[in-house]
Amino acid sequence: MKWTNSFIFTSREPPADAETISQKLMHQAGMIDKLASGVYTFLPLGLKVLQKVSDIIREEMNNAGAIEILMPALQPASLWKESGRYEKMGKDMIVLKDRHNREMLLGPTHEEVVSDIVRKYVKSWKNLPLMLYQIQSKFRDEIRPRFGIIRAREFLMKDCYSFDRTERESEISYLKMRQAYMKIFQRCNISVTIQSADSGVIGGKFSEEFVAAGDCAELEIGHIFKLGTDYSEKLNVLYMDKDGKQKPVVMGCYGIGVSRVVAAIIEGSHDEKGIIWPLSVAPFVAIIVPVNMADNKQVEIANNLYDELRTEKIDVLFDDREESAGVKFADADLLGIPYRITLGRKLTQGKIEILERKTQKKYDVEIGKVKEFLTKALKDSK
RNA sequence: CGGGGCGUGGCUCAGCCUGGUUUAGAGCGCCUGGUUCGGGACCAGGAGGUCGGUGGUUCAAAUCCACUCGCCCCGACCA
């Protein structure tokens, strides 16, 4: 991506109403834009990170045997009345009426919908165990949205649901998810602690939450629940067991606030200059910075390097703006891109400088060996 | 919902208390031209504001009063 063809707008000052570090940095780096309290647009840079995190989650969910679907945000209120949660959720739900005056709502979570799907299709013990998940927007009319993206009213969530024959088998699904969660957060470079928690409105027998380390008091970035047969009994999610008897499936549910994970990564990885992305979720592997755009040689080499890396599928940002070196360096630091490839005066010796964002270490690399350097860095990070 | 704070060009803010030379300013950003070119460069010129909204007080309101909308923080509550 060339900067001049992109949609990246950085700002020198954090917005006046931002309080937490992740909120400030996401705004300054041009990752997000606030539309209303607790409602945000993900701009290209923010979206890239969101997608990287989603990809990691998707991979680990698939590895654990979960199957991806996509459920609707718009749901009939009647289904919630059936489960008894229409009253329980109360004002946390955004409720609306369609043109026929039918009561609808924007889903704050999807136990009801997924249960409805499973009760329609799963009839036999042969269909179990089953794990279904999705990555989708949730709507919750928070009493008080806070800390930018961390507590939003509309946010991206991965929610997974498990369906098993017995408590014991449900336990196995639960532990699989628990394991997958550990891997996900590890890959995102977030250190988490696991705490047993109050199950709240979700209900169920037992739950644990994954809390990210960091200054910010909120939250919890993942929460896993053993639901037992609460939902399946109320919503008639039944299967025919080996013994010919109909039984309610044993359920579990597992959530990760994807957009919140992005904030948590920043909370745990930044300095006074800006964000420090781990390679696994960085929007770009490297940023190419010609120090002087008036220097034809620098620009030419930068272009060649850019083409070369793109051919190798190494995702780089080429800062081709007519800006001073200071501005470009400051922005590179702010955006937190792991490697800065500086084309400057060392070119006369055939060298390119690579600066590692995290350690501030500088490497002088021969012009032809940049690709090799980055390939190795990517490999080492895995 | 209770408590506190804030709303002035794209952004950060000054001006408000003590209404009137402010035709409403500054810095940053933006546009044009020129000089620069390894840590947020410089010079010259320029564009851009219903001072959140409505109603009132007054000869006169960004400034005082009332209402209202929006945003932030603390608390209760929640993922």
Image: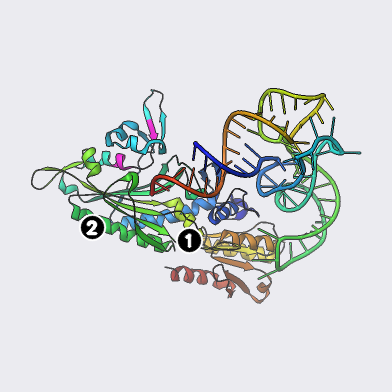
Image quadrant containing the N terminus of chain A: bottom right
- Circle 1 or circle 2, nearest the eye: 1
> In the image, is residue A148 part of the stretch drawn in magenta?
no
Kind of residue at badge 1: Gly
The residue indicated by pointer 1 is A214
The residue indicated by pointer 2 is A172
The residue drawn where x is 37% and y is 28% is: A103
Residue A214: in sight, yes or no?
yes
Residue A282: in sight, yes or no?
no
Residue closest to the eye, A372 or A201: A201
The subunit letter for the residue under badge 2 reads A
Residue closest to the eye, A365 or A282: A282
Mark 1 residue element = loop
The residue drawn where x is 33% and y is 42% is: A110
The residue stretch that appears in magenta? A104-114
> Residues under labels 1 and 2: Cα distance?
31 Å
Q: Count the numbered circles shown.
A: 2
